[in-house]
Amino acid sequence: MAKPGYGKRSAPDQQPRTPHDFALLPARERYIAGFVDHLPDGAAMSVKQLTRQLPLYGQQAIGTSLNALSVAGHLRRVRCPVGTGDETRWAFRTFWSRTARDNAWWTTYLATETAVRTAAPAAVPQQRTA
């Protein structure tokens, strides 16, 4: 599993699973899409992690397939700044949809997702006093 707040996030309003979900994709992308679709929400989705779990393909092939799944409308990886104070790090948030979506749908969905995330900031733990 990825750290909380990262990893696979399923998009809403998906069609139910069927054996023909990814039938229009090439064989490698169909195999990887089927695997990703069965991962639980919050599962790590990095190229290296998927390569460990799918020994049939290497890192280059997995990365290329994830890009192809993005083009096909099943996957969106969004680079977001994380960190506190003066420290800035970058992380990818990965959104998955079994149902292929067009760019307009993804743009609208990600805009609302970003608005929800910024409207409700993470709770800051209270410092203990001795």
Image (cartoon, helix red, strand yellow):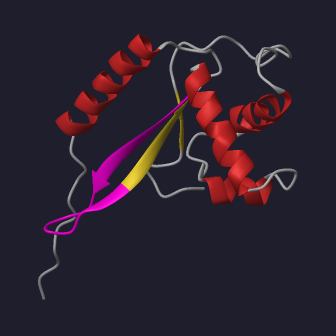
Name the residue rendered at 59%, 36% in the picture.
Answer: 67
Residue 69 coordinates in the image, percent (x, y): 63, 29
- 10 horizontally vs 62: left or right: left
Residue 104 coordinates in the image, percent (x, y): 39, 12
- Residue 106 versus residue 116: which sits nearer the camera? 106
On whether residue 87 falls in the magenta region, the answer is yes
Q: Is residue 35 above or below residue 44?
A: above
- 2 horizontally vs 85: left or right: right
- 68 horizontally vs 76: left or right: right
Name the residue rendered at 82%, 35% in the picture.
Answer: 28
- Residue 73 versus residue 97: which sits nearer the camera? 73
Q: How many marks?
A: 0
- Residue 29 versus residue 80: which sits nearer the camera? 29
- Residue 78 versus residue 35: which sits nearer the camera? 78
Query: Main SS type for the magenta part?
Result: strand
Name the residue rendered at 65%, 60% in the picture.
Answer: 48
Q: Quadrant of the N terminus?
A: bottom right
Q: Which region shows up in magenta?
A: 75-90
Would residue 101 be seen by someone viewing this image from the given angle? Answer: yes
Residue 45 coordinates in the image, percent (x, y): 60, 48
On whether residue 104 falls in the magenta region, the answer is no
Name the residue rendered at 88%, 51% in the picture.
Answer: 56
Q: Is residue 60 above or below residue 38?
A: below
Residue 52 placement: quadrant: bottom right
Q: Quadrant of the C terminus?
A: bottom left
Q: Is residue 4 above or below residue 121?
A: below
Residue 58 coordinates in the image, percent (x, y): 77, 55
Would residue 97 be seen by someone viewing this image from the given angle? Answer: no
Task: Check the image and name the residue furthest to the bottom.
Answer: 130
